[in-house]
Image (tube, rainbow, N blue to C red):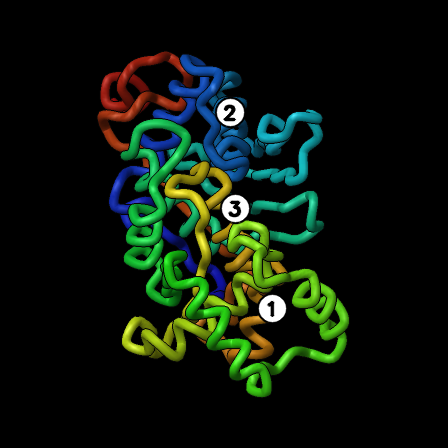
Amino acid sequence: MQKDKIYEAEEFELSLKAYLSYVSRKMKKNENYSPHPLVRALVNAIDGALETGKPGRYVGVSGDANHFSDGEARQMIACVIEMNRDNTMTILGIEDISLQKSIPIKVASYILLLSIKFDKYEGDYIKVEDFIDIVNNTIPQLNIIRFNNDEWKQARDYLAENMDTLKIPYEMSEEYEKDFLSIKESTPWEEYPQRVRSTIASIWMQYQYPELYKEGAVNTVSVFLDEEYPKAKILNNILIMLYGPTSEYFGDVLKWNLFNDLNANEGTSKISAKIGRNDLCPCGSKKKYKKCCGR
């Protein structure tokens, strides 16, 4: 990541400030509205700053406990922002408390941009084809390829005939062997272990549809059993792919140099979100900035 690089809000195509204000209002009006924890943590930090109306540093924390029946969060994210005297907001850092790892600002930028685009679709769910199109057009280094579930038998039989070409890391071979042995001829596709489905799909797509692969990108074959998925779940999968254990796999195995900067959180990188003249004033007056502190 380039040191001291400032990502202006204009890079998000829509005003980041306006979007976060929209999320804050929607969260207050609709208790069922559930943006990604990274977005909620950032909104919580900004709301804290607006309540005091003073410059300074603020922290917002959010998790995904509302997505689970036991009420226990699997992911907790904290955002630290600085409300500046010149009426700008700077994101100083974003921490994944669960993984005990910093989320690079560039990764956060992608998640925020995806969130903006996803929210153009009503509800908490988004169709598979829609989110694949959005992700592939927003993050050029990614290329998600959807496996056609109607071809699962052909794909299974093809892999069975070419098992000698399958290379599995030694430390994972025992787990894979157990998964493969659990499958019978009558086992439906939906009951295959997830990693077996992914392996079968990936081998088949490389063989049958090489034209779908994009040079210079990380090509990911995905198996979707449903036509719609929660937006927050999709965003979290992309987030983990960009900076979590999955990104380390790409870097080590696929030589994914395009995102080397995403695995390091060096320097003072930040997003500077300028307040537009027609945005709400950060002092909390509920007036437009141009008619309040921006006079």
* Tag nearer the camera, 2 or 1: 1
Q: Earlier in the sequence, mark 1 or mark 3?
A: 3
- Pinpoint residue 204: horizontal percent, then vertical percent: 43, 73
Q: Which residue is mark 3?
A: 236
- Judged left or right of residue 42, residue 12 is left
Q: Is residue 287 visible?
A: yes
Q: Is residue 186 above or below residue 231?
A: below
**Which residue is painted at 67% across and 33% down in the image?**
73
Residue nearest the observer in this picture, 283 or 255: 255
For label 2, count other residues whose C-alpha is less than 10 Å away and answer few (under 14), some (14-19) or many (20+).
many
Task: State which quadrant residue 56 falls in.
Answer: top right
**Which residue is painted at 34% across and 21% down in the image?**
281
**Mark 1 and mark 3: span between their CA atoms?**
16 Å
Split into 4 quadrants, where in the image is the C terminus? top left
The kind of residue tagged 3 is: Asn
- Pinpoint residue 77: horizontal percent, then vertical percent: 61, 39
Q: Earlier in the sequence, mark 2 or mark 1?
A: 2
Which dot marks residue 49? 2
| Secondary structure beneath label 3 | helix
Q: Is residue 131 above or below residue 85?
A: below
- Judged left or right of residue 57, residue 72 is right
Residue nearest the observer in this picture, 295 or 207: 207
Which dot marks residue 248? 1
Q: Is residue 113 visible?
A: no
**Which residue is painted at 47% across and 77% down in the image?**
158
For label 3, count other residues whose C-alpha is less than 10 Å away and answer few (under 14), some (14-19) or many (20+).
some
Residue nearest the observer in this picture, 200 or 69: 200
**Which residue is painted at 54% across and 33% down in the image?**
41
Residues under numbered marks 2 and 1 in contact, where contact means CB atoms less than 8 Å apart: no
Q: Earlier in the sequence, mark 2 or mark 3?
A: 2
